[in-house]
């Protein structure tokens, strides 16, 4: 059985990842693709108010479960578009550990901070300042297969750019390079 391909979109909140993912499902014409977003997993969680420690533990378990769900879906041959925020170093390290790096097309979704803040305000469904908080964190690892700027391109154009890149993606993927780099560094 052939494992599925993972188009992994990483960017801050309000950067346009979900909009790009929806467009990718429309423009990719080489099989069946699934959009997996960690927000959808979080929406399945109980609605009762959780104490801070309990919430932190639930969020960590949700994210670890999400990583493994992505891995399991790809392992059995599903092609995926993953919409995620790598705002904590452990998240990237865990993804590097559970995903086959040669199957991942790692896409950095960038957007100017002023535009992120404008989008955040207009959405009204995110805590104020979330995008600014994540802005300096999500791209800190500094290595992608492809980078796009949603401040310059609309979601459809971003999806078309990703589609055009797929046949030219490198054999030494960003996930492969990052896995090697992090394996050589001591764990903190």
Image (cartoon, grey):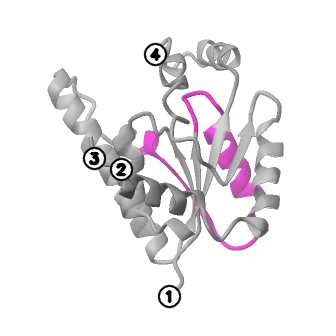
Q: Residues within 10 Å of mark 3 (few under 14, many from 20)?
A: few
The label number, if any, that marks residue 1 in the structure image: 1
| In the image, residue 67 above or below residue 156 | below
Residue 62 location in percent, x, y?
30, 45
Residue 159 location in percent, x, y?
76, 50
- Residue 180: say if magenta: no
- Ranked by sequence position, the earlier of labels 1 and 3 is 1
Quarter where residue 87 is shown: top left
Spatial separation of the CA atoms under disc 4 and disc 1: 43 Å
Residue 43 location in percent, x, y?
39, 38
Question: What kind of element bears circle 4?
Answer: loop
Residue beneath disc 4: 127
What are the residue bounds of the magenta stretch? 11-40
Residue beneath disc 2: 185
- Ranked by sequence position, the earlier of labels 4 and 3 is 4
Spatial separation of the CA atoms under disc 4 and disc 2: 34 Å
| In the image, residue 87 above or below residue 159 | above
Which of discs 2 and 1 lies nearer the camera? The answer is 2
Question: What kind of element bears circle 3?
Answer: loop
Spatial separation of the CA atoms under disc 2 and disc 1: 34 Å
Q: Nearer the viewer, residue 46 or 7?
A: 7
């Amino acid at each position: 059985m052939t494992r599925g391909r993972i188009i992994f979109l990483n960017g801050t909140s309000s950067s346009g990842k979900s909009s790009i993912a929806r467009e990718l499902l429309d423009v990719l014409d080489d099989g069946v693709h699934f959009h997996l977003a960690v927000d959808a997993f979080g929406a399945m969680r109980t609605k009762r108010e959780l104490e801070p420690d309990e919430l932190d533990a639930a969020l960590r378990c949700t994210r670890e479960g999400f990583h493994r769900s992505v891995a399991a879906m790809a392992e059995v041959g599903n092609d995926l578009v993953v919409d995620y925020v790598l705002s904590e170093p452990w998240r990237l390290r865990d993804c590097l550990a559970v995903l086959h790096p040669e199957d991942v097309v790692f896409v950095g979704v960038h957007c100017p901070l002023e535009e992120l803040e404008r989008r955040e305000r207009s959405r009204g469904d995110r805590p104020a300042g979330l995008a600014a908080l994540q802005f300096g964190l999500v791209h800190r690892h500094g290595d992608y297969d492809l980078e796009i700027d949603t401040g310059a391109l609309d979601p459809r154009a971003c999806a078309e750019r990703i589609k055009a890149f797929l046949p030219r993606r490198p054999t030494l993927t960003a996930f492969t390079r990052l896995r090697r780099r992090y394996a050589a560094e001591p764990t903190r």
